[in-house]
């Protein structure tokens, strides 16, 4: 997709921005760098046009991301109704459910839906949905470059660069294509602080994150002749390390980095009877289909789901499913 493909949609978004005063940016539960980077970039752009903007995403916001430009726009769910947004812009959010139905609060206002998940339900009045895009930030970038390239400040460029950096696993995942790299290059041209972002978000780790990594790596198990890796994060590991679940971003990549591993599952004990599962595929298997069977979703190579059962039961259940996938059952 190029800027050309969406020329009329981009014009419509700009019209909505220019003809209204109050905007709500929303993102998916437990927002990541792509989700928040995209939300904050849009926030800075819309604010620069003299408008009021608040941002909301349910769940946990990783502490480091609170340092991004635009993060001061984050608000609580309770504040949204009185703010009375006239337009909602949803970023990186495939369904209402993934935003915990926040759109129900605002009533019948136009929704702009900018996303790159294949499972997107096209719920917007304007839908910029391109599953071939490595990051939602790429879609925001195409929009801004198409309607007003001069609006792209170093802060906006940094937010967008971070989105691409995070969703491509620092330009290592299969989605690292010409488009992603060329956008990243151009964003540096617009002033993105590429080195600082990589240093802060990829290289630097909190002490408690590394303390948590030790038992999580210890939980690694291989099955199906090394083709499947599983890892667990139990409550007791959080307690002993002083870390939280949000400190474990990227841990699943250790499983995926093992020679011969094709499928990886990381299980997080959210509660005694609630387990969140992250899935990664390094072969042709589409793990979003497996996640979908349990009400989850995501991308072919990276998906997730939550099951209301104990971590050990869920580990057994999902492992059986993964074994079925690799053995062709
Ligand atoms: P992660 O494993 O990093 O949390 O998520 C990987 C991908 O799967 C992300 O694109 C994320 O949006 C998606 N995902 C994770 N958990 C869920 C879920 O419970 N439901 C849906 N629909 N998607 C999920
Ligand atoms: Mn994304």
Image (cartoon, rainbow, N blue to C red):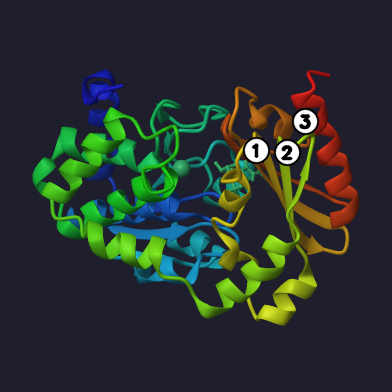
Task: Determine crowd level at label 1: few under 14, some 14-19, many 20+ residues with C-alpha closer than 10 A.
Answer: many
Q: Is residue 106 above or below residue 133?
A: below
Q: Earlier in the sequence, mark 1 or mark 2?
A: 2
Q: Earlier in the sequence, mark 2 or mark 3?
A: 2
In the rendered structure, are the residues bearing label 1 and label 2 in contact, judged by CB atoms less than 8 Å apart? yes
Q: Closer to the camera, 147 or 160?
A: 160
In the rendered structure, are the residues bearing label 1 and label 3 in contact, judged by CB atoms less than 8 Å apart? no
* CA gap, disc 1 and disc 3: 23 Å
Does the closest atom of ligand 1 sit within 8 Å of the Cβ of label 2?
no
Q: Residue 243: x, y in percent?
A: 63, 75
The quadrant of the rendering that contains the N terminus is top left
Q: Residue 270: x, y in percent?
A: 76, 62
Q: Closer to the camera, 171 or 72?
A: 171
Q: Earlier in the sequence, mark 1 or mark 3?
A: 1
Q: Is residue 115 above or below residue 55?
A: above
Within the image, what quadrant is residue 149 found in? Answer: top left
**Residue 73 visible in the snapshot:** no
**Residue located beneath label 2 in the image:** 226
**Residue located beneath label 1 in the image:** 261
Please report the residue visible at 88 percent of the width from the left and 58 percent of the height from the top: 273
Q: Nearer the viewer, mark 2 or mark 3?
A: 2
């Amino acid at each position: 997709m190029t800027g050309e493909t969406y020329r009329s949609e981009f014009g419509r978004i700009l019209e909505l921005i220019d003809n209204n005063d109050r905007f709500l940016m929303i993102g998916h539960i437990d927002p990541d760098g792509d989700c928040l980077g995209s939300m904050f970039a849009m926030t800075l752009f819309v604010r620069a046009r003299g408008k009021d903007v608040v941002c909301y995403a349910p769940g946990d916001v990783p502490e480091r991301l609170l340092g991004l430009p635009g993060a001061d726009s984050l608000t609580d769910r309770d504040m949204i109704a009185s703010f009375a947004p006239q337009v909602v812009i949803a970023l990186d959010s495939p369904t209402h459910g993934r935003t915990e139905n926040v759109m129900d609060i605002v009533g019948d206002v136009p929704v702009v839906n900018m996303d790159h998940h294949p499972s997107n339900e096209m719920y917007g009045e304007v839908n910029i949905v391109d599953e071939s895009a490595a990051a939602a930030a790429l879609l925001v970038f195409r929009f801004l470059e198409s309607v007003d390239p001069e609006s792209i400040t170093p802060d906006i460029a940094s937010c967008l660069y971070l989105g691409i950096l995070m969703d491509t696993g620092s330009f290592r995942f299969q989605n690292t294509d010409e488009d992603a790299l060329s956008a990243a290059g151009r964003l540096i041209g617009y002033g993105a602080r590429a080195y600082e972002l990589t240093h802060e978000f990829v290289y630097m780790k909190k002490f408690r994150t590394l303390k948590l990594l030790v038992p999580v790596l210890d939980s690694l198990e291989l099955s199906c002749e090394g083709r499947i890796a599983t890892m667990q994060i139990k409550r007791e590991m959080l307690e002993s390390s002083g870390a939280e679940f949000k400190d474990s971003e990227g841990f699943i990549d250790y499983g995926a980095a093992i020679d011969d591993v094709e499928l990886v599952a990381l299980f997080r004990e959210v509660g005694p009877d609630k387990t969140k599962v992250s899935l990664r595929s390094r072969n042709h298997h589409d793990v979003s289909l497996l996640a979908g069977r349990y009400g989850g979703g995501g991308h072919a190579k990276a998906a997730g789901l939550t099951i209301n059962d104990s971590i050990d039961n869920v580990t057994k259940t999902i492992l059986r499913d993964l074994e079925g996938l690799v053995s062709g059952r």
